[in-house]
Image (tube, helix red, strand yellow):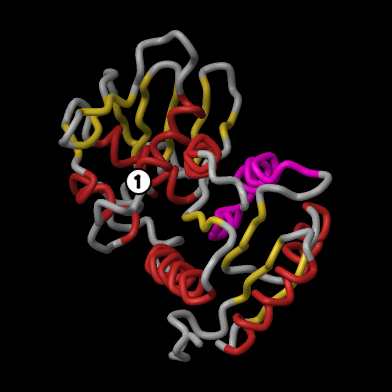
Amino acid sequence: MYKTVEPVVKNPTIVVVDDEPSVREILKDMFSRESFRVYEAESKQGLMEVMRRIPVDLVTLDLTLSTENGLDILRDLRAESDVGVILVTGKDELIDKVTGLELGADDYISKPFLLREVLARTRSVLRRRGAMHEKKDELSAQPNGIHTDDPWEFHFYPWTLSQASLELRHSNGEVRSLTTNEFRLLELFVANPNRVLSRDRIMERLRGMEWTPSDRSIDNYVARLRRKIERDGDTPMIKTVRGSGYQFTVPVARNKAAIH
């Protein structure tokens, strides 16, 4: 039996996505015992129906649904939501786990699993994301002394990042969708061009907490950001500096943003 303790987030809401009723029942029973609000879904449609009705803190997502690919669901989910995601999968192939993390999953658990492990990993993700969400709408403290009451625009061809509108615009007029943390991460990079930023500093900026070597979330955010701003074959804008962190390598110009 697992030990019952107080939840890290008060009554968090979790959606268990699995096409096996027995698995859903086991996880629902465990989470309910811990005072979590639990909803079930056996498909992407069911998950989206829940998320349209209520705020969701975390999703446990099976990769091997009978009629759908869990990675495709994760990709679609990440395009429109920053909800916490733990992959619960019977697949033990490293490529599936790595792909899931690169697509934005917070963690993964292999079947068969121990309930204590699921609960511990769930609490860990909720704890980390809880710290992140506390700062989600707080963009006042900017890197290098830049503040939103004195917003700037950062120009790095072919993109413009605007602190006033919180948008990333292409030179052709396209507005590229970014999650809150993707915006914060890009903002940190362009405000510090050519400077190597450690994972510690990036984690502090995004989440206000200490980074640990087992936390792949920074690498995941960088990978997702690269896919949104870099083109295949071009020189990378965000360079990985082995053992040190990341470096934004392209020239950046900035000017005061026009306030309308």
Element type at marker 1? helix
Q: Is residue 63 left or right of residue 252?
A: right
What residue occupies the far front of the structure in this picture? 112
The residues colored magenta run: 68-89
Q: Is residue 233 above or below residue 112?
A: above
Which residue is at a point 26% across and 36% down the rendered structure image?
Answer: 191
Q: Is residue 210 visible?
A: yes
User: How far from the left and from the top, in percent, is residue 250?
Assistant: 29, 18
Which residue is at a point 55% across and 54% down the rendered structure image?
Answer: 82
User: How far from the left and from the top, in percent, is residue 132?
Assistant: 40, 63
Q: Which residue is mark 1?
A: 218
- Crowdedness of circle 1 by 10 Å Cα count: few (<14), some, many (20+)? some
Q: Is residue 260 visible?
A: no
Along the line of sight, which residue is nearer the eye, 260 or 207? 207
Tell how many labels. 1
**Residue type pointed to by label 1:** Ile
Q: Is residue 257 left or right of residue 213?
A: right
Along the line of sight, which residue is nearer the eye, 54 or 259? 54
User: How far from the left and from the top, in percent, is residue 60?
Assistant: 62, 62
Q: Is residue 169 above or below residue 124?
A: above
Q: Is residue 31 left or right of residue 239?
A: right
Q: Is residue 5 above or below residue 184?
A: below
The answer to which image quadrant residue 177 occupies is top right
Q: Is residue 211 above or below residue 144?
A: below
